[in-house]
Image (cartoon, grey):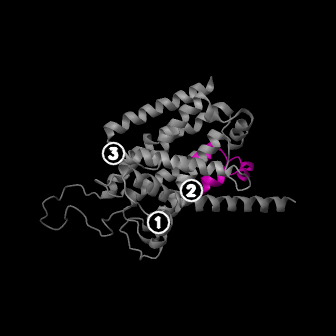
Amino acid sequence: MFENTLVYSILAVIGTVLVCFLISTLLPGIERKYIHARIQQRIGPVVLAPGVMAPIKFMFKENVEISSPVPGLYKALPIICFIVVLCVLVALTPQAYQFPALASLVAVVGFLKVEEICYILMGALSKSVMSVRMPFPDKIKGAAHLNSNRSFIEDISAKRSLRMITYGSFPLYLALFAPVTAARSIFLSDIAAYQHANGPFLFTASGIIAAIVFFIGYMIILNEYPFSIIKAKSDVIEGPYMEYAAKYRAIVYLTRGFFMFVLGAIFSVLFIGVPPTILSWGILVNIAVALIFVFMMGILSAFSPVFTNRQLLPTILGSTLLGILAIVLGLL
């Protein structure tokens, strides 16, 4: 009996992951086709192009050798990011609730932090420009700048990633802990059960404020305009992703769409009390939330420039204060 239940649970989790992943491949195309293209009054790409066709195309391209002090780790980082996002989704499923160490808000925050740290490592471990090692300044005898510091484009991105992981994503984590004040528990099962008994946390004063903060944090952790300082195309081009090509870039594309869906699923669990599972029609709520966030992000990013530090810091500070307010209201 126990073995049948375990197999059933595993199959349910696998089915949920597959459904969520397949839908996530459509999210980048929906954002670019039906939001950015419409706002900019152009046709835009096919919906399947950014999240499906582009990864398939990159899968068949030739890999390049990257100049890196730790090439194995550098190449593994996109895979690690995908696995981390996958672990977050698994932790959100009801079948994982019997493992408290996994299905807790602390575990979710830990996984998200690992995903952020990967950006720093991506930038710090790349020592080439367009896959060609070009140290600057020149180190040959008679060079004019022998005592100058050498740096690479990704170094700039790594420093900005460290800045964002230090304080940039702070509003998101405050928003994640706001529902804890109502449920009085860090475990996802308790947070979902509380909302089933008392209604969605989203429809409270604390929940509304926390939802606004969550959306700001959602855009920050996705590095989307106006918070895309780690990959601003005006100076660092693609940021930590710049040197990834072929299969590695395909994984980067797939991970971004998957991460967009998983962040929506986190909101569904914490603010509405609906975990992702194919065994319930509630998965339609997860899909709807993911789409709503994509539409809101697409609209805001289409009209936004890249924030400078002078604009970024007050925005993050204001969002942080709102997150604290949401937690305080939840305690009352």
| Residue at image coords 32%, 57% | 237
Q: Is residue 303 above or below residue 133?
A: above
| Residue at image coords 30%, 65% | 129
Q: Which residue is mark 1?
A: 49
Q: Which residue is mark 2?
A: 84
Q: CA distance from mark 1 to mark 3?
A: 25 Å
Q: Is residue 101 above or below residue 240?
A: above
Image location (x, y in percent) of residue 261:
56, 53
The label on residue 251 is: none
Q: Earlier in the sequence, mark 2 or mark 1?
A: 1
Check the picture and name the quadrant holding the C terminus.
top right
Q: CA distance from mark 2 to mark 1?
A: 25 Å
- Observer-side mark, 2 or 1, equals 1
162 lies left or right of 105: left
User: Could you tell me what secondary structure mostly forms the magenta stretch?
Assistant: helix
**Is 86 within the magenta?**
yes
Q: Earlier in the sequence, mark 2 or mark 3?
A: 2
Q: CA distance from mark 2 to mark 3?
A: 30 Å
The amino acid on which the numbered mark 3 sits, given as a three-letter code, is Pro
Whether residue 174 is visible? no
In this view, the residue farthest toward the top is 332
Query: Total of numbered circles in the picture?
Result: 3
Question: Bounds of the magenta span?
Answer: 84-108
Image location (x, y in percent) of residue 112:
54, 49
Q: Which residue is mark 3?
A: 305
Asked whether 62 or 209 is in front, the reply is 209
SS for dot 2 = helix
